[in-house]
Amino acid sequence: MSGLSDVVAVFGFIDQAVVADPGLGPKVSPLLPGYDQGAAGWYQGVSEWIPSALRQVERSDEAAATPEPEAPVAPSAAPTTRGPTWPPRR
């Protein structure tokens, strides 16, 4: 489980507990203010969306971690093996 899914699971567990026992709402609301405004039950609707969202985030993280192939260097832009010489060679 990723760190994000662990956090969502914790908040989901709290939400399910508040849904099961509405008396927990006032106890939870100092830490999660939405519960004093009727937010209980959000997890049920979001829980179906979370797995697909996490897969999408993981795919984008993998894509960002994959380096793009380097473009070929044109011969005129290729570095020389010899630097300039001074004084000029005779």
Image: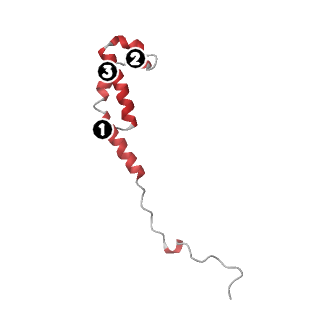
Relative horizontal placement of residue 90, taking residue 68 as reference (left or right) = right
Q: Amino acid at mark 3?
A: Gln
Q: Residue furthest bottom?
A: 90
Q: Amino acid at mark 1?
A: Ser
Q: Quadrant of the N terminus?
A: top left
Secondary element type, mark 1: helix
Q: Quadrant of residue 67?
A: bottom left
Q: Which mark is residue 52?
A: 1
Q: Quadrant of the C terminus?
A: bottom right
Q: Counting residues from the N terminus, which is met first, the one under dot 2 or under dot 1?
A: 2
Q: Residues within 10 Å of mark 2 (few under 14, many from 20)?
A: many
Which residue bears the numbered disc 3? 16
Q: Which mark is residue 79?
A: none
- CA gap between label 3 and label 2 equals 12 Å
Q: Are marks 2 and 1 in contact (CB under 8 Å)?
A: no
Q: Residue at x 29, y 26 (%)?
A: 45
Q: Counting residues from the N terminus, which is met first, the one under dot 3 or under dot 1?
A: 3
Mark 3 or 2, which is nearer the eye? 3
Residue 64 is situated, as x and y percent measured from the top left of the image, at: 42, 50
Which residue bears the numbered disc 2? 35
- Please say if 78 is above or below 12: below
Relative horizontal placement of residue 23, taking residue 76 as reference (left or right) = left
